[in-house]
């Protein structure tokens, strides 16, 4: 049956060839913030989605031909900032560095020191895939700090939701180690920050649609019933975790949901699996804030995955989460970039995702909907 799916699907066969060529990557075994000022002023009626970023995200150098490269940030920002309907209507915010205490709410002091030392000593590889260079520590701290800044934005009403084009990504980083391109777990740090700083945030949902299982995030919250971690990912695939039976431990049992997806599954079928999972989660868990570990390497064109999702599928999944968040937590969503490595398509996919996030506010307010549509023309 598996062979049948592969042989019947020409797109899958093309991807299989590309992946074979690139399998070196990701197939190996695997406070207060410093700054928080808006980069420019905004109209509160229309700028409901914040884009939290910093130029340091393109200074995390990973070496020649590494897929997690600085150009990912550049193509993303180009796609967003050159969209005349999108860019004038978002709230642009500058990320600040996360304080050490915020990072260590999710990581051991030894891990923090190890990354710091590796960067200061100019050590190249933290594992077979994970490279650091001179500015990597700053980029990692600003990525984690950016997610915390986005939490502030949605909690204070500056924005309804937020997207962050962060580098390095975070979901493979465990409490103790860097791996899979990830140094610190940006979304996990943001989740803990939200629960610590805002008394009204008791429960958090993390939805991870990256093609790879977020083993780091799962591990950090595995025994925690206040953070629901849901991952839909290609399986088996890097990093090898994320089987259906991994569902939490102790008091956290039942608060981790893994939906493994076979390579080459039709996008429509994968979307159905996603919708079913969100329905299942929402019947038992009411989050006060929703995070998206937004990896776009499950896209049909991505060189590091073998799934077949299109821009439209990511838009639909965004809409599903937007509707869920609107019904349980005033639409509060913080979406942070994880994977996504096709520089030709990544910008367009993220633009679709952000455009849907911008409509999040509109979907439950006719007044805002009219404002958005009028302003967008
Ligand atoms: Zn990934």
Image: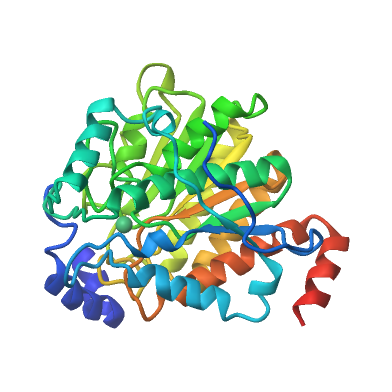
Q: Residue furthest top?
A: 250
Q: Residue at x 43, y 44 (%)?
A: 144
Residue 145 in percent (x, y) is at 47, 44
Q: Is residue 271 above or below residue 309?
A: above
Q: Residue at x 37, y 16 (%)?
A: 250
How many numbered marks does the figure carry?
0
Q: Is residue 231 above or below residue 199?
A: below
Q: Is residue 51 above or below residue 285?
A: below
User: Residue 133 occupies which quadrant of the picture?
Assistant: bottom left
Residue 343 in percent (x, y) is at 35, 76
Q: Residue at x 71, y 49 (%)?
A: 158
Relative side of 331 to 133, left or right? right
Check the picture and name the quadrant holding the C terminus: bottom right
Q: Residue at x 28, y 64 (%)?
A: 68
Residue 224 in percent (x, y) is at 43, 23
Q: Is residue 239 above or below residue 76?
A: above
User: Residue 281 occupies which quadrant of the picture?
Assistant: top right
State which image quarter holds ligand 1. bottom left
């Amino acid at each position: 049956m598996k062979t049948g799916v592969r042989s019947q699907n020409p797109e899958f066969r093309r991807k299989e060839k590309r992946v074979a060529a690139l399998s070196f990557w990701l197939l190996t075994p695997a406070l207060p913030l410093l700054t928080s000022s808006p980069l420019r002023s905004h109209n509160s009626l229309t700028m409901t989605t914040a884009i939290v970023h910093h130029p340091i995200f393109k200074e995390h150098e990973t070496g020649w031909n590494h897929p997690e490269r600085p150009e990912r940030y550049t193509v993303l920002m180009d796609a967003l900032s050159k969209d005349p309907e999108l860019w004038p209507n978002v709230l642009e915010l500058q990320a600040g560095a996360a304080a050490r205490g915020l990072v260590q709410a999710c990581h051991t002091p030894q891990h923090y020191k190890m990354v710091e030392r590796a960067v200061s000593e100019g050590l190249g590889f933290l594992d077979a895939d994970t490279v650091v260079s001179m500015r990597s520590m700053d980029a990692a701290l600003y990525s984690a700090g950016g997610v915390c800044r986005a939490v502030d934005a949605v909690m204070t009403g500056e924005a309804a939701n937020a997207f962050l084009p962060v580098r390095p990504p975070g979901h493979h980083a465990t409490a103790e180690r860097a791996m899979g391109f990830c140094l610190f777990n940006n979304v996990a740090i943001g989740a803990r920050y939200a629960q610590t700083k805002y008394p009204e945030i008791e429960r958090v949902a993390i939805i991870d649609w990256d093609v790879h299982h977020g083993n780091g995030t799962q591990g950090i919250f595995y025994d925690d019933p206040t953070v629901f971690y849901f991952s839909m990912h290609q399986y088996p695939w890097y990093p090898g975790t994320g089987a259906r039976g991994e569902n939490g431990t102790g008091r956290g049992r039942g608060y981790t949901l893994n939906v493994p997806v076979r390579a080459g599954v039709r996008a429509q079928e994968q979307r159905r699996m996603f919708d079913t999972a969100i329905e299942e989660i929402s019947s038992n868990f009411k989050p006060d804030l929703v995070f998206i570990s937004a990896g776009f390497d499950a896209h049909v064109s991505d060189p590091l995955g073998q799934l077949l999702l299109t821009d439209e599928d990511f838009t639909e999944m965004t809409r599903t989460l937007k509707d869920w968040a609107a019904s349980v937590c005033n639409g509060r969503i913080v979406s942070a970039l994880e994977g996504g490595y096709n520089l030709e398509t990544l910008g367009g996919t993220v633009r679709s995702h952000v455009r849907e996030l911008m409509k999040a506010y509109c979907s439950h307010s006719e007044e805002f909907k009219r404002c958005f549509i009028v302003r967008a023309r």
